[in-house]
Amino acid sequence: MTIRPRTVGFLPGERNVFFHILTGCNLSCAHCYINKEQHGANTLTDETMHEWIDLFTDPRKKSNMIFLGGEPTMHKGLAAGIEHAKKNDFVVTVDTNGFLFNDILAKTSPDLLDYLSFSLDGPSAEINDPIRGKGVFDVCTENIRRAVGLGYKVSVIYTLSRKNIDHLHKMAELLMTLGVKKFFIQVIGLRGNSAQSGGDVNDDGEWQVSSQRWLDIVPKTASKIAEYGIHVTYPKVFLEEEEQFQCAGLVAENYFVFPNGRVYQCPLCEDHPIHAYTIKDGKLVRREGLTEQKFFTLDIPEGCVMNKLLQPGNIEYLPSGKPKNRISCCLLKQEVGW
Ligand code: SF4
Ligand code: SF4
């Protein structure tokens, strides 16, 4: 039976905090989006980490805290940070490259950490390792097995590009073998390293897939993977004719927090100094002047304005000059599965 995907709309009253506690990492993935010039190279102290968790705590809201890096498990204070976020009623996730430093599985527990998400960009070392590094597939899959065995709720994130789109369908079998029931497909963004060699829908750049290929492959494959009992989430990317465009910057509450104190509302803006907020003297301060917020209200036929400005090559036009597809907010998701 084919399971139909559904759109996950933005939920009013929900807050998501994507908290980069350091930018350092043991890997150097070919598509790494970390940009130290813009995001800083520092590691937050434990004290600052806890202060910033408090800063984003609002007991009236259903709140999610996603610890990110760099590689967040390289931070010795991560376990205490997880505990602090849990105490403040966050649903807590850690996104890891799979190396699980500082004995994190032993230092925290499935009661405190709600989800542990591993990044894997291929169903085998042959596909994953040219993107993420030699030997990474083996370490990552071994640690997924350990985490599942210890009772952690584990998910896998697959950053989809021209390099691995043809292998997406083989992920179902691997996830089943590993005991993983939650799978996220992420679209490659033209940020960080991939911005240098990404290409667009009209040329033969290394990374981005054309709209047609995305539409032909991703929804169908996601439904097939869901048939194995796996819950699959992927970005909407293209809006249907009748669907309404919504910018998360206006209708949702997302904070992308970097260790240099920059706080963005839109991840597409992260390579540019147009962050909406900054953390100063322990307070979240709204910035004046040209910030991302000025762009959110612009109404254009192409949909997402930042996509049009930063990745214009992603948009295809009909001979009439009308965009072939409207691009949805990059934070709008489709999900499929029970
Ligand atoms: S694991 Fe993440 S932070 Fe580290 S190099 Fe890869 S993409 Fe960048
Ligand atoms: S991706 Fe586009 S639509 Fe979404 S928050 Fe950013 S500017 Fe708004």
Image (tube, rainbow, N blue to C red):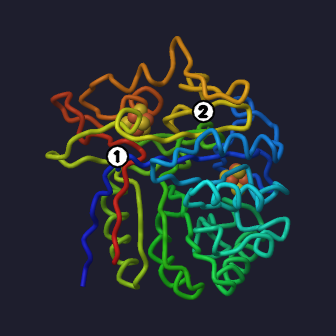
Out of 105 and 224, give the one closest to the viewer.
105
User: Which percent across, then down, holds residue 295?
Assistant: 40, 22
Give SS at disc 2: strand
User: Which percent across, then down, holds residue 191?
Assistant: 58, 39
Res 246 quadrant in image:
top left
Nearest to the eye among marks 1 and 2: give it. Answer: 1
Neighbourhood count class around disc 2 (C-alpha, 10 Å): few under 14, some 14–19, many 20 upward: many
For ligand 2, give the image quadrant. Answer: top left
Q: Amino acid at mark 1?
A: Pro
Q: Amino acid at mark 2?
A: Val
Looking at the image, residue 305 lies above or below residue 267? above
Neighbourhood count class around disc 1 (C-alpha, 10 Å): few under 14, some 14–19, many 20 upward: few
Contact between labelled residues 2 and 1, with CB atoms less than 8 Å apart? no
The residue sitting at 25% across, 47% down in the picture is: 239
Q: Tell me if 216 is positioned left or right of 137 in this view.
A: left
Q: Residue furthest front?
A: 59
Q: Tell me if 266 is positioned left or right of 263 in this view.
A: left
User: CA separation, marks 1 and 2?
Assistant: 20 Å
For the residue with label 1, is its CB less than 8 Å from the closest atom of ligand 2?
A: no
Give SS at disc 1: loop
Do we see residue 203 in this rendering? yes
The residue sitting at 37% across, 55% down in the picture is: 333
Looking at the image, residue 139 lies above or below residue 84? below
Looking at the image, residue 58 lies above or below residue 26? above
Res 118 quadrant in image:
bottom right
Determine which residue is flagged by label 1: 12
Which label belongs to residue 42?
A: none
Determine which residue is flagged by label 2: 263
Looking at the rendered image, the quarter that the N terminus falls into is bottom left
